[in-house]
């Protein structure tokens, strides 16, 4: 891989890490699971489908560490530390983890394969997980990361295309399929925005949620504060309006019959 591409990939990992930190700040840990927004959609469901990236954040930590360690990607070589081994080639690498502590609490075990983007001028890679464990959570599927470059400096963004299934020790599974784009948006004289857009599907406990839209918040806000997301749960269409940019914890739900309801995130 060319040095320029390696630098771009490291930028991806910096952006992903920043995104993980911002997600952890924006995810409410004290949501009342007994609060029901409608007869069909609960507050807990809404929080879960918006925050599935938290589950796989340790994977991004692993990938960032491996990229940092790959200082000679034009050759085939092996590297290791006390808990993982990795074999690099010109097209990617395969890494095997043995009780690696990635996020301070959970250990990673299993093998993942990463293939770099075919275009050497584009910073992208696809990671494939096969029975990969973080603690007692098992992960299967693929995640593709792409750094988006534009001719302006008004935004820095990366896109994640996921086809991931996460299985918990209890037997519960969450699957996510689709595309999300995360961005820092800059405007002269304005606060920097953290933006999420895209279209993806989450399957949880036998229910299917299809989500699309474009939402933002300033870096100091805990919750999404502007933009609208469309959530379809098993055919029920709900519009979730996060507001006009005011930094608060309120959102408005609108149903197909025009009924609206203000809820607390």
Image (tube, helix red, strand yellow):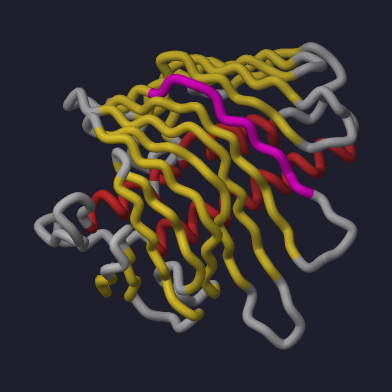
- Above or below residue 72? Residue 250 is below
Q: On screen, 57 above or below 242?
A: above
Q: Residue at x 64, y 52 (%)?
A: 15
Q: Nearer the viewer, residue 255 or 107?
A: 255
Residue 33 coordinates in the image, percent (x, y)? 14, 55
Q: Which residues are magenta?
A: 139-148
Left or right: 82 with respect to 168? right
Residue that sits furthest to the left in the current view: 34
Task: Judge whether residue 264 can be spotted in this image.
Answer: no
Which quadrant, please, contains the C terminus? Answer: bottom left
- Say which residue appears at 46% left-offset and 14% top-offset: 130
Is residue 151 found left or right of 53 in the rendered image?
right
The answer to whether 178 is drawn above or below residue 199 in the figure is above
Q: Nearer the viewer, residue 165 or 202?
A: 202
Residue 234 appears at what percent x and percent y? Answer: 29, 38
On screen, residue 175 above or below 28: above
Which image quadrant is residue 206 in? top left
Q: Main secondary structure of the magenta part?
A: strand
In magenta stretch: residue 185: no
At horizontal 60% and vertical 24% (from top left) the residue drawn is: 127
């Amino acid at each position: 891989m060319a040095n320029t591409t390696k630098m771009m990939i490291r930028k991806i990992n910096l952006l992903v890490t920043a995104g993980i930190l911002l997600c952890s700040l924006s995810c409410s840990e004290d949501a009342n699971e007994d609060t029901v927004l409608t007869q069909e959609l609960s507050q807990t469901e809404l929080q879960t489908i918006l925050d599935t990236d938290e589950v796989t954040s340790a994977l991004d930590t692993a990938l960032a560490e491996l990229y940092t360690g790959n200082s000679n990607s034009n050759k085939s070589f092996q590297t290791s530390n006390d808990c993982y081994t990795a074999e690099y080639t010109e097209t990617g690498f395969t890494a095997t983890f043995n009780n690696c502590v990635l996020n301070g609490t959970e250990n990673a075990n299993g093998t993942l394969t990463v293939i770099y983007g075919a275009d050497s001028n584009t910073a992208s890679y696809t990671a494939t997980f096969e029975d990969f464990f973080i603690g007692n959570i098992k992960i299967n599927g693929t995640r593709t990361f792409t750094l988006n470059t534009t001719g302006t400096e008004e935004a820095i963004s990366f896109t994640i295309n996921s086809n991931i299934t996460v299985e918990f020790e209890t037997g519960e599974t969450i699957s996510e399929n689709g595309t999300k784009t995360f961005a820092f948006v800059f405007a002269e004289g304005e606060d920097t925005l953290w933006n999420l857009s895209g279209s993806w599907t989450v399957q949880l406990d036998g229910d299917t949620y299809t989500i699309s839209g474009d939402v933002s918040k300033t870096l100091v806000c805990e919750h999404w504060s502007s933009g609208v997301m469309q959530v379809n749960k098993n055919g029920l269409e709900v519009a979730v309006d996060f507001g006009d940019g005011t930094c608060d914890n309120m959102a408005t739900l609108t149903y197909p019959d025009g009924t609206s309801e203000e809820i607390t995130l």
